[in-house]
Amino acid sequence: MNFEYVKEQYGVPAETGRRVTVYGKPGIIVEDRGHYIGVNFDADKPGVIKNAHPTSEVQYHGIGKIRKASRWAARYDRYLQYGESFRSFLDYCRWDAQKDRSWN
């Protein structure tokens, strides 16, 4: 899914990297969330994504640059996706730090 539903249903130019203003708060679209757009607001840390309805007080602007999340935040996001087979976040971190780890 690359904003197909949002584009077809609401007729908006939603895409990853597009600058938006939602209820007066500037941000950038970073993720397709089905019926919503995932926005990283300028006031939030990189990697913090909040849902916004595509037509509810949203102004669409040009393309911008997506800020990267910190290494720690990126590691925690991977844990949320793949960490269910580990007993704890610490066990996951130990495994993730190994150079010869595999995702299998």
Image (cartoon, rainbow, N blue to C red):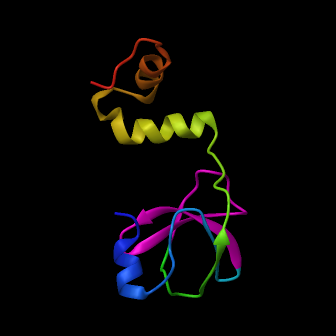
Which residue sits at x=43%, y=73%?
A: 36
Q: Is residue 61 left or right of residue 50?
A: right
Q: Quadrant of the C terminus?
A: top left
Residue 82, how many percent across, how many down?
A: 34, 36
Residue 103, how many percent across, how many down?
A: 33, 26
- Vertical relation: 24 (above or below) 69: below
Which residue sits at x=73%, y=63%?
A: 43
Callout count: 0
Between 100 and 18, the residue placed more toward the observer is 18
Q: Is residue 6 left or right of residue 51?
A: left
- Vertical relation: 49 (above or below) 73: below
Q: Residue 25 is drawn in which quadrant?
A: bottom right
Q: Residue 87 is drawn in which quadrant?
A: top left
Q: Main secondary structure of the magenta part?
A: strand
- Whether residue 99 appears in magenta in the rendering, the answer is no
Residue 13, how many percent across, how many down?
A: 51, 79
Q: Quadrant of the N terminus?
A: bottom left
Between 103 and 61, the residue placed more toward the observer is 61
Which residue sits at x=66%, y=51%?
A: 67
Q: Is residue 8 left or right of residue 69?
A: left
- Vertical relation: 72 (above or below) 99: below
- Whether residue 49 appears in magenta in the rendering, the answer is yes
- Vertical relation: 84 (above or below) 25: above
Where are the magenta residues, as a range? 25-51
